[in-house]
Amino acid sequence: MAEVKFSNITKKFNENVVLNGLNAEIRDHEFVVIIGPSGCGKTTLLRMLAGLEEITGGEIRIDGVLVNNMHPSKRQIAMVFQDYALYPHMTVEENMSFALRLRKAPKAEIEQRVSEAASILQLTKLLKRMPKQLSGGQRQRVAIGRAIVRKPKAFLFDEPLSNLDAKLREEMRVEIAKLYQRLDATIIYVTHDQVEAMTLASRIMVMNHGVIQQVGAPIEVYRKPANLFVAGFIGSPTMNFIHGRLAAEGGKLYLKNESLSLLIPSFLLSGTAEHDGREVVAGVRPDDVLAGSAAHEPNKKYSEKLEGVLEVSELLGHRENLYLKVGQTRVLATVEAFFNQSPGSGVALRFNYENMHIFDKASTKRIND
Amino acid sequence: MNKESVVHKRKKAVKYLLIHLALIAAAAACVYPLLRILSVSIRPGDKLISTDLSLIPDGATFAAYARLLKETLFLRWLWNSLLITVSTSFIGVSLASTAAYAFSRFRFAGKRSGLVLLLSTQMIPAGMLILPLFLMIMKLGLMNTYLGIIIAYSVSSLPFSIWILKGYYDTIPRSLEEAALVDGTSQLGAFYRIILPLSTPALSIAFLFNFTTAWNEYLVARVVLFSSQQYTWTLGLFELQGQYITQWGMFAAGSMLVTAPVLAVFLYSSKWLISGLTLGSVKG
Amino acid sequence: MDILYSIYEILWFALIVVTGIALIEGCCYYHFRFHDRPWFIPAALAVLPASGAAGCLALGLVAEPVKPFLWLLGSEALIALFFKYVVKGRNTLPYLLLAPAFIGLALLLVYPFVFEIYLSFHDLKLTTIMAWKNTGSLPFVGLRQYADVFTTSPLSEVTFWALLGRTLWWTFINVFFHVAGGFALALLLNNNIRFKGFYRTLLIIPWAMPQVVAVLAMRGEFHSQYGFINIMLVKLAAAWPFLAHLGLGPAQWLSNYPLTTCTLINVWLGIPFMMVVILGGLQSISSSYYDAADIDGASYFQKLRFITLPLIRPVLMPAVTLGTVWTFNNINVIYLVTGQSGGTERADILVSALYKAAFTYNRYSYSAAFAIVIFAMLFFISVFYLKSFDAAKEDR
């Protein structure tokens, strides 16, 4: 299997710089998900690794071998395309065996590998069909099967589930997870869907504007976002951001803005005086906001009680989203259903200090640990 | 049922009746000349010159066909046309298929100007190039040969074919070739194994277009070919349909023999042929 | 035996084409691949011109190889420098793919065009053609051919200006009836009626028939005695004598009204294409517009005026442009109707006169100049037209 190393990768389309000096490393047997909004350069990076896009500057190494100018097929990778790219004029079997036939592999071996891959993916009955006779999920499986047959060092997935409907996407996600356990291969998976990233990845690589924002295990990226972008991008519903200025008063630190004043305890952010006057953004996930009667009893782990007004509530089933307003600051809280208060009424709320994140406004970097 | 809806229905029926009448009249005007040729071709020799308008003449006979095949070089002309046309179309389509691929898939200096050049060649009146082509063919000593006429024909439909094929290639997703590249073909291999097999409809349209253009060509053939051994059928028929009506029957028989297959192919493939042709020409 | 010989000739031709393409590709590949080697230019200069000149000699194109050798040497030097310092081996594959097609176009479209310009400044006619064929030299006459175009008749009596007027009239009348007829038929066909496909098939027959057959057959129908047209006219006049009093009767179509005959034939030929294009346009208009207009209370003609016409404009305009150029350049119909020996010149338009001047009267250089004049006219008209088209586009 394979290790992949990107060093100092740059990519320009004419004058348009897409990647500028990107460094990253993917370890053997790792399932790395590259996630980011569209246009962030994630697909470009994957296509450069596959050899489909020219490398403007920097080096890509697979297992220590420089592949910058290597033909895609020599890199021993397999790619699953967003639109599957099944050859419409070939049967499923021919699609899967195409690469092996090009390499003039022995017939017996081709047959054996195709039938093996087909049985893994439950495609055995479909081998003689043409791609257009298949459903979306089946096509997706053929595309994956085509990759498996080649026994590559690394699998590259380019948003493979984005053309499927919600239910199928869930099923295929589980299939891919199973497949990873079975193949134990290096997988590099590009997506913009954070659920896929959270569920599949051993490590997530968050990208924006051609720059890697954070690399880490899913839980790490979720619990300790390195900057405002990651904090806002990962997690649904989106994290609440409270903009304000830190003020040191009587040996204690407060986050203040026109509508609220929030004590920042020292276990959250150490140091007092040196932070005085600093513009910051505090982030709290909606799940970490206590609202209503639960917020009435004091709790050391939570902030002091704030008074908000309920604007709208959305019932999701077992949970309920509360859109609250504290002065001019909007706060979203997700609580257990049913929340028996009508819009316009006052709601008490507290923030969970243990899952609060403080970011410097200027650098957008996280400053608590 | 109230009165209004009865009136409405009657109005509608009258409208459709008028539409059908108009279309029948137009269709008759389109088909009648063809039927007339057919009828003339089966007239017996002594009634060839007549003012009779009935479509199936008394004593209908295929004598004109027999005479045409026996007394003239008609088969030879057909053979000549076929050879010339197939060679021309083959060259035209193969050159166009690769050139269109370059235009569809690559970015390179001069791409835009190349496309503009292609379009602007369509503005040069065909009649204008006959003279220099004729002189070149003469200078090369290729008068009255297949070679001369094929050379003259081979590039005439090239810009149009390139345009049609480029349009079609553009609709094939790039990821197919990329998958093929990853699977181990070269760029040319991807073209040959993926794009060409997928483009059969467009290739057939281009081939048919090249074929019909060359098959029906008259003006260049007129000046390059001068011995009746080398004539294409267009030249042959023009000779048969002389100033006087003596060979009218044989002309009609020849016309039928030439028209029937062309018409059959055209009508059979009309649905996609027309969409391809009008699309290509109108977009161009 | 004959057939064997013709197959042999075709195989020989195939061999030439394949070798030609291989040579082109080889040369291109050499220039792309080795542009940065130190021996690139010397090797190119040594091998290519010499083998090219030898090839010319072997094919019998020239008597002695010095002149082509020098030509090739000069152009090869330029080409090699161009590849070394400008192209630098970039975009190899697309250029290799394009090379055969574009060299073909250059040799058979661009070179003839340039050659035509050359001819128009010289004097090539029946008396000088043998000398030209043997020695390749022609007397230079400057602009005389151009002056002749405007002052003398290309044929025997009709003048350039008369031809120009006739051409414009011919183009206008034909395109007008093509569009009007095509539009009417397309509107009829666009109803939800029975046998629609059948009508459509019959209606495209004039377009589907080989043009030579169609024109010659129609020409037969205009024969003064045995053509359908005159037979019908005679019968009509016999059935209703008052028509005959109004002047209706058989006519010598081909000799007395050749232009009318040609126009009738060409209108008949050209309607189906327009019909198909317009029908395609009509079918692409979503019926919801008509539903909306019905609710707004629009009459049939209001719908035609405010919905159909504006919405098929994008389809119609290019088709009309193309149809105009085709009609302007239509030699076929006129030549096939009037081209026999002793044929009239009263139906000739510019392009057919050009063809006859070159190949009936053998005035080669004259017709070259004539062709350049026609081309220049077409060129300026289209530039002007495209400009106004662009301007109209920007207005919207």
Image (cartoon, coloured by chain):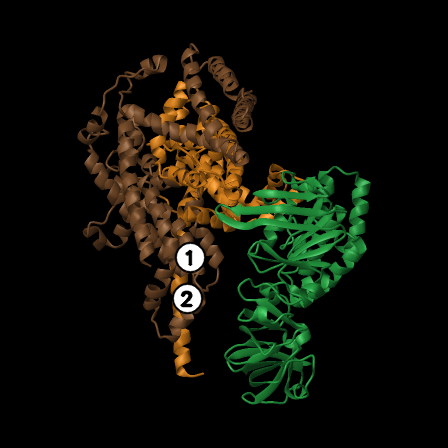
Chain colours: A green, B orange, C brown
Q: In the rendered structure, which amino acid carries the disc numbered 2?
A: Tyr
Foreground of the two, A108 or C96: C96
Q: Marks 1 and 2: in contact by CB < 8 Å? A: no
Where residue C287 sits, quadrant-wise, is bottom left
Cα distance, mark 2 to mark 1? 22 Å
Outermost residue toward the left in this view: C151
- Secondary structure beneath dot 1 equals helix
| Nearer mark to the viewer, of 2 and 1 | 1
Q: From the image, which quarter does the N terminus of chain B lie in? A: bottom left
What chain is tagged by disc 1? C
| Residue, disc 2 | B16
The residue lying at 78 percent from left, 43 percent from top is A110
Q: In the rendered structure, which amino acid carries the disc numbered 1?
A: Gly
* Crowding near the residue tagged with mark 1, few <14, some 14–19, many ≥20 C-alpha atoms within 10 Å: some
Q: Is residue B11 visible?
A: no
Foreground of the two, B60 or C14: C14
Left or right: residue B91 versus residue C169 is right
